């Protein structure tokens, strides 16, 4: 039977959880309930108690209550909930998870959901779902539904929302169970793309697919880079075609699309073959012009659309970026290669385009060349990044590195 785990505070939201539980069971699904409340008395007995949740994180619930530190208690219950949920999943006793909550309950529930693999249905009905949810979702495939009203009773507004949530999680869970194991039989590679490197990635993707790979493309918009790094860490990919490393420029200069300081490091740490280029390092991303910090006044800008303004990186910034990339790749434990497109690192950095700046590009390339150790292969091509020949060469090189690593493993 399809099993759905309900996780939440049964002291403050016991009636709402009971309503949702009954709706799910009416759909023919089994329900496991987990109580993550801290102070009040549960409205009814759950399958997994709050004491068990606290213990899973290494804490005694009564001690948490006596400490009277809500933030610390939420952190502890989040750790315990994540451990229990992951354990249930690993035992095959969970096909989906649903939670209802305010900010505290959502924090605990989201932590538990992030412990589950991509593809496991995760639905969070929350009072904070209409705002910035990045801290809750992270790099997980969590579906958030705005509760509209506070989760405090079954009324004419909350009733249809909770009914829809119950139906949605049942539908997702049943669809997943009916499809069975969706794991690809083809080896998977990750590729990074931006609008200004789309032509390159499209051609490289075709080439990699012809080599027999399943290609997963990530939008290099900060969250995309973080998601890719997380999935690399989880062992999804046998190789990485990091065409578009633009997020490093946002991290360095202070743009909106940084993927964090660890970008371009995980594949190297894990020894996964990677082919890297300099896609879109000619730009830093901001919002509308009136939101750009005043310290950048006088720089070269390009209005990509009403909501996105691009700023050209300088020779000094590119010199630093080259050294940063070199240091990151030098740490790689697996095979790595760098491809240099001499005639433009994006579609708008070519000659006669708005971000054409050969001095800035030269600073990037020369600093990278000087920083890079000899074990990282250097491929210099007299094309722009979107030329079909450049894209196909990158794809072929990644295929070569992956096959060479497989041969080494088979010998060992």
Image (cartoon, helix red, strand yellow):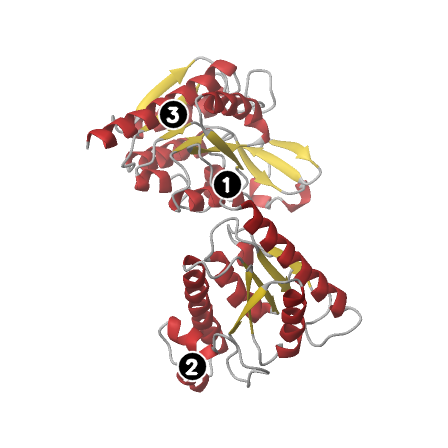
**Residue 404 picture location, percent across and down:** 29, 25
Q: Nearer the viewer, mark 2 or mark 1?
A: 2
Q: SS of the residue at dot 3?
A: helix
Q: Give the Cα distance between marks 3 and 1.
A: 26 Å
Label 1 environment density (alpha carbons within 10 Å; few <14, some 14–19, many ≥20): many
Task: Name the residue beneath numbered marker 3.
Answer: 398
Q: SS of the residue at dot 1?
A: helix
Q: Nearer the viewer, residue 84 or 322?
A: 84
Task: Name the residue beneath numbered marker 2.
Answer: 61
Q: Residue at x 63, y 67 (%)?
A: 25
Label 2 environment density (alpha carbons within 10 Å; few <14, some 14–19, many ≥20): many
- Whichever of callouts 2 and 1 sits on the residue coming sooner in the sequence is 2
Quadrant assignment for the N terminus: bottom right
Tell me, yes or no, if residue 131 can be seen here. no
How many marks the image carries: the answer is 3
**Residue 50 picture location, percent across and down:** 47, 78
Quadrant assignment for the C terminus: top left
Q: Nearer the viewer, residue 130 or 374?
A: 130
Label 3 environment density (alpha carbons within 10 Å; few <14, some 14–19, many ≥20): many
Name of the residue lying farthest toward the right: 156
**Residue 266 picture location, percent across and down:** 36, 42
Question: Residue 410 falls in which quadrant of the image?
Answer: top left
Tell me, yes or no, if residue 124 can be seen here. yes
Q: SS of the residue at dot 2?
A: helix
Task: Name the residue beneath numbered marker 1.
Answer: 250
**Residue 220 picture location, percent across and down:** 52, 37
393 relative position to 295: left or right: left
410 relative position to 225: left or right: left
Q: Nearer the viewer, mark 3 or mark 1?
A: 3
């Amino acid at each position: 039977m399809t099993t759905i785990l309900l996780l939440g505070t049964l002291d403050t939201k016991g009636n709402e959880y009971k309503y949702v539980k009954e709706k799910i069971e009416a759909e023919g699904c089994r329900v496991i309930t987990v109580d993550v409340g801290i102070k009040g008395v549960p409205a009814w007995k759950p399958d997994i108690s709050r004491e068990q949740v606290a213990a899973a994180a290494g804490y005694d619930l009564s001690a948490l209550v006596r400490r009277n530190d809500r933030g610390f208690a939420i952190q502890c219950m989040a750790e315990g909930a994540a451990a229990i949920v992951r354990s249930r999943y690993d035992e095959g006793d969970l096909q989906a998870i649903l939670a209802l909550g305010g900010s505290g309950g959502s924090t605990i529930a989201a932590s538990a959901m992030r412990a589950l693999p991509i593809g496991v249905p995760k639905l969070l009905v929350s009072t904070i779902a209409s705002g910035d949810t990045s801290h809750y979702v992270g790099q997980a495939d969590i579906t958030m539904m705005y509760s509209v009203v506070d989760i405090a009773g079954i009324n004419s507004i909350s009733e249809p929302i909770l009914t829809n949530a119950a139906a949605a999680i049942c539908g997702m869970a049943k669809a997943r169970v009916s499809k069975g194991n969706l794991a690809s039989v083809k080896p998977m590679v990750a590729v990074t793309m931006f609008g200004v490197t789309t032509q390159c990635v499209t051609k490289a993707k075709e080439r990699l697919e012809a080599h027999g790979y399943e290609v997963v493309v990530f939008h290099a918009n900060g969250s995309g880079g973080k998601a890719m790094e997380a999935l690399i860490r989880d062992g999804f990919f046998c190789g990485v075609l990091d065409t578009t490393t633009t997020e490093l420029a946002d991290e360095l200069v202070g743009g909106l699309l940084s993927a964090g300081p660890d970008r371009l490091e995980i594949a190297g740490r894990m020894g996964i073959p990677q082919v890297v280029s300099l896609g879109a390092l000619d730009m830093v991303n901001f919002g509308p012009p009136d939101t750009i910090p005043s310290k950048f006044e006088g720089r070269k800008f390009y209005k990509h659309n009403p909501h996105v303004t691009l700023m050209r990186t300088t020779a000094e910034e590119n010199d630093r970026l080259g050294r940063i990339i070199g240091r990151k790749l030098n740490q790689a434990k697996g095979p790595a290669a760098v491809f240099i497109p001499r005639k433009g690192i994006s579609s708008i950095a070519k000659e006669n385009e708005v971000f054409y700046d050969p001095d800035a590009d030269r600073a990037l390339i020369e600093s990278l060349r000087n920083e890079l150790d000899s074990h990282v292969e250097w491929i210099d091509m007299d094309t722009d990044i979107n030329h079909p020949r450049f894209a196909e060469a990158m794809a072929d090189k990644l295929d070569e590195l992956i096959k060479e690593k497989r041969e080494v493993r088979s010998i060992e």
